[in-house]
Amino acid sequence: MKSLLHSRNIFLSLLAVVLYAHSSCWACTLTSKNAAQAEEKDWWQTAQFYQIYPRSFQDSDGDGIGDLKGITSRLEYLKDIGVTAAWLSPIFKSPMVDFGYDIADFYEIQSEYGTMDDFRELIAKANALGIKIILDFVPNHSSDECEWFQKSLRRERGYEDYYVWHDGKLDADGKRIPPSNWLQAFRGSAWEWREERQQYYLHQFAVQQVDLNYRNPAVVEQMKRILRYWLDQGVAGFRVDAVPVLFEVETDENGQYPDLEVSGTTDDKDDRTYLKNNLVENRPETIDMVYQWRQVMDDYQRIHGGDTRVLLIETYAPPAYTMQMYGNRSVEGAHLPFNFNLITVLKQGVSATTVQEAVDEWMKNMPAKRTANWVIGNHDQRRAASRYGVQRTDAMNMLVLTLPGASVTYQGEELGMIDGEISWEDTVDPAACNSNKSIYENFTRDPSRTPFQWTAGTNAGFSTASKTWLPLAPQYQTLNVDVENSSARSHLKIYKSLVELRKSSKTLQNGSYKYKALAEDLFVLKRFLNGDDTIIYVANFGDKTVTVDLQSEFDATLPSTMTLKISSLDSTKTLGSDINPKSIIWLPVRR
């Protein structure tokens, strides 16, 4: 160790750090373009969004299922970790085939989650704490138990074309078959026959999730009415589910839907990816619908005042399509189309080069004067700590909280929660249940939906029930709020330090950025603002020791000494110590 110090190397036993350089004369050398003060941001542009999966957050009545009163009882925790806005996965009346994403009544609360009075109590307490509540809006489909579908099934006036119906076609033997070869997301045909109507209906998800017909103006107006209703209840906006599949190609001159081409990516003929889905996803009409929903948000604010009501869009789509969601020169679109690059691009492996690719793909395609956002997990993905590696938990949380724009945290990522181990017998996710025991783990989303871990006690403090709706994940005795809050160092404490820095730093809120992958595994991000402190994020994502001179290999304007502000859990270096950026040895991640 002494020889390293004598040679001016600094030995850091850590994966990732945030370094701090106090504003001084060297900052004045920044170019006017990069140093220009950014205009004041609206609340959502630097927000820390936090996704709550209500079924798994907190159970208040001992039935093993999370609920609204449970969320209300834990709002102080959200305040403590600096949450700006909490997004709730669906809480509406539902038969729970897809756990709320199959809505039977868009205007009512699911009874096992609570009542409208419970919801109003949640809104009131959240407002008192300065936390905004955002709801999940599921516009593509309704449950087959929805009153609208039952009326459409009977061809009642006004509802005949509320959904996508088709007669189907006859094969060579005169047998009636589905209109096309389209596949649903949960395996098998996207068409279902109903004897009562003598037609097929389209369902891009489960059989019980019936696609609404957005070529029907009555459907469009109904969904806008739903948005206004919940805005009247005090929500701050919506996360919009499954937007890319809102429209499908129209029928041809003979009234028939075309078949999709085989993709060549899998031999599994029941898997949706067996086919190219260009005719049923990412249609141009969908972009216009997003613009119409944004107009609802803006009109509501104009009439009622208050803060901006936000529109967050789920879109797993190519950049050229996704970026249109933002709007254009003449019309506004989504405030934030969700950026899943740190999920999708990093599926090929976690390294500095893939991180740079993910960041590049967003920042180099994003239209001017728009706001970026960063997501590393949600209820549809395996948990971040399990996908990236537990040893990279802090590095990934640091990354999303230091990159420019808004951040999105899925419940438990701040703790380093890992996937639950769900047997076939305990599996409830329809994506897995529609497969079989030998392949269900390739499709299940249950592992990321296990109960939130509050304590090391019974059911991790989530519920007093004898059995929870999903089993607890491993390591809940150590990866929980109580233990991590009381520990000298923990993922949670590091996360809270990051949030505090983010909220107090004008550089992180308004500053410019520069980033680079130094070799395969070392990623560096610089945030800087004229007259304010500069912040450097550095992470070694690999399994080899790396020595780097940040001044010569990344930025010659860096000062000779920087201060260690935040480091990952394995670090032995003292926070507040001086770091020489000219020669730092970065140890590999611990496995």
Image (spheres, rainbow, N blue to C red):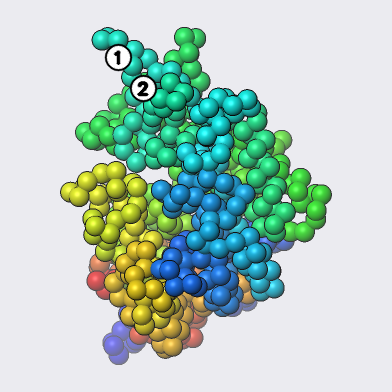
Badge nearest the viewer, 1 or 2: 1
As drawn, which residue projects farthest toward the left?
Answer: 438
Please determine whether, in this image, residue 71 is positioned above or below residue 143.
Answer: below
Please determine whether, in this image, residue 155 is positioned above or below residue 519.
Answer: above
Closer to the camera in the image, 459 or 421: 459
Closer to the camera in the image, 498 or 573: 498
Which quarter shows the N terminus?
A: bottom left
Secondary structure beneath dot 1 equals loop
Kindly indicate the quadrant of the structure image that contains residue 482.
Answer: bottom left
Please determine whether, in this image, residue 584 is positioned above or below residue 135.
Answer: below
Q: Are marks 1 and 2 in contact (CB under 8 Å)?
A: no
Closer to the camera in the image, 198 or 77: 198
Image coords of residue 562 (percent x, y)? 50, 78
Residue positioned 72% across, 54% down in the render: 232
Residue positioned 59% across, 26% down in the render: 156
Residue wearing tag 1: 175
Q: Is residue 244 visible?
A: no
Describe residue 306's horizontal placement relative to residue 434 as left or right.
Answer: right
Kindly indicate the quadrant of the structure image that contains residue 425.
Answer: bottom left
Describe residue 451's horizontal placement relative to residue 300 as left or right.
Answer: left
Label 2 crowd (10 A; few <14 / some 14-19 / many >=20): many
Residue positioned 31% across, 67% down in the render: 471
Describe residue 317's horizontal placement relative to residue 270 as left or right.
Answer: right
**Amino acid type for the residue under numbered disc 1:** Lys
Secondary structure beneath dot 2 equals loop
**Amino acid type for the residue under numbered disc 2:** Pro
Image coords of residue 117 (percent x, y)? 65, 64
Image coords of residue 70 (percent x, y)? 52, 71
Residue positioned 42% across, 49% down in the render: 98
Label 1 crowd (10 A; few <14 / some 14-19 / many >=20): few
Residue wearing tag 2: 178
Q: Label 1 vs label 2: CA separation?
A: 10 Å
